[in-house]
Amino acid sequence: MTINHQIRLAARPMGLPKDSDWQRTEEPMPEPAEGQFLVKVLYLSLDPAMRGWMNDGKSYIPPVGLGEVMRAGAVGKVIASKHPKFSVGEVVVGTFGVQEYALSDGRAVNKIDPGLAPLPVWLGTLGMPGMTAYFGLLEVGEAKAGETVVVSGAAGAVGGVVGQIAKIKGCRVVGIAGGADKCRYAVEEMGFDACIDYKAEDVKTALKQHCPKGIDVYFDNVGGDILDAALTQITRGARIVICGAISQYNNTTPVKGPSNYMSLLVNRASMKGMVVFDYADRYAIAGREMAGWLVAGKLKSREDIVEGLQTFPETLLKLFKGENTGKLVLKVADDHE
Ligand code: NAP
């Protein structure tokens, strides 16, 4: 009998998730009923949003219930099917959860072409983070050639793509990231004009130096003090994209709001939140353009791959400790098994 190893949410964490917030379970591998197919999970997407899904409260998506398999995006292979539109051997991306095998009825599942890019890229640059970068920068941020774009979380899955798309579109790009290695990566490998190491520099002073004409678009992945510093340097009509606030996700005290928000008034600027799922009907269009940039070498994709489903609890923490560069992915099984 084939076993399906799973990781379930056992408790709602206070602060950083602990090992005791998870439960490891085993079940027999399920069999598809009529209208279903069975996916063998190959790679799991580890996302900062997972921390929010563990909390009880109103959000853009319901929380994961206690005792449920943890929600996760994944790439997998169809290994059994009683579904008219999905066949054995096809590679698919969907929300299959932190487990080895998942049943699906095909809703919100997309087929991917493994020949176009390695499988982990479909969870990063050609997946949800890439779509977030694309629509957040171009539609919410309305970035235009000649403008100055600043992005925090610059060496991460979303931030790295934001900066590179902004360069493709002719913007000046300044990243903000933690540590000299990440900043070097942003400038030397992804082509950013500059990158501020927020762990070693005063962000406000450095922004003034690297953005002499001010910030036209600030793409915020981190919130907190860095958002506040960026607000002091915005131009008239600037757009601030609220994509995430990872510096606040594990707070046990209330979220720290921006004290410099009056800068929005003075500069007739706007601050707008975005949720990538709102753009789902146009992922294919964005994906084609992004794939073209990848093939042309204009866009680089980097994945940080850790192996083993059972390492999920500690691997997830890498996001909150800044230990990943590029998209954090958990490898669950080999493609050829
Ligand atoms: P990521 O940037 O690949 O990984 C997280 C990074 O956040 C870490 O590597 C770390 O980099 C940084 N970080 C962690 N704690 C921090 C702190 N206290 N202060 C400043 N930086 C900190 O993650 P991602 O998947 O690309 O997600 C980035 C952001 O986008 C997150 O806020 C996420 O929630 C958001 N997001 C939003 C949507 C949406 O639809 N709105 C969709 C996807 C993602 P350093 O070493 O540089 O600190």
Image (cartoon, rainbow, N blue to C red):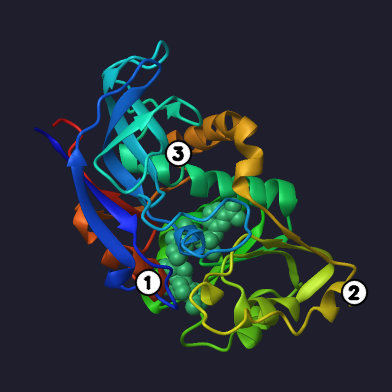
Marked residue nearer the N-terminal end (2 or 3) = 2
Pinpoint residue 95: horizontal percent, then vertical percent. 43, 40
Residue 118 in view (yes/no) = no
Residues packed near mark 2 inside 10 Å, few (<14), some (14 to 19) or many (20 plus): few
The Cα–Cα distance between marks 3 and 1, rounded to whole angstroms, is 35 Å
Residue 292 vertical position relative to residue 69 in the rendered view, above or below: above
Image point (56%, 52%), residue name:
62
Using the image, tell me which numbered label, if any, was put on residue 265. Answer: 2
For disc 3, the marked residue is 294
The CA span between labels 2 and 3 is 39 Å
At a point 69% along the width and 79% down the height, the residue shown is 257
Q: Secondary structure at mark 1?
A: loop
Q: Nearer the viewer, mark 1 or mark 2?
A: 1
Q: Is residue 52 left or right of residue 41?
A: right
Point out the image quarter for the N terminus. Answer: top left
Callout 3–callout 1 Cβ contact below 8 Å: no
> For mark 1, does the 10 Å Cα neighbourhood hold few (<14), some (14 to 19), or many (20 or more) residues?
some
Q: Which residue is mark 1?
A: 17
Taking the spot 41% from the left edge, 78% from the top edge, the residue there is 179
Residue 325 at what x, y percent from top left?
37, 63
Instruction: State the residue in front, 28 or 227.
Output: 28
Q: Quadrant of residue 74?
A: top left
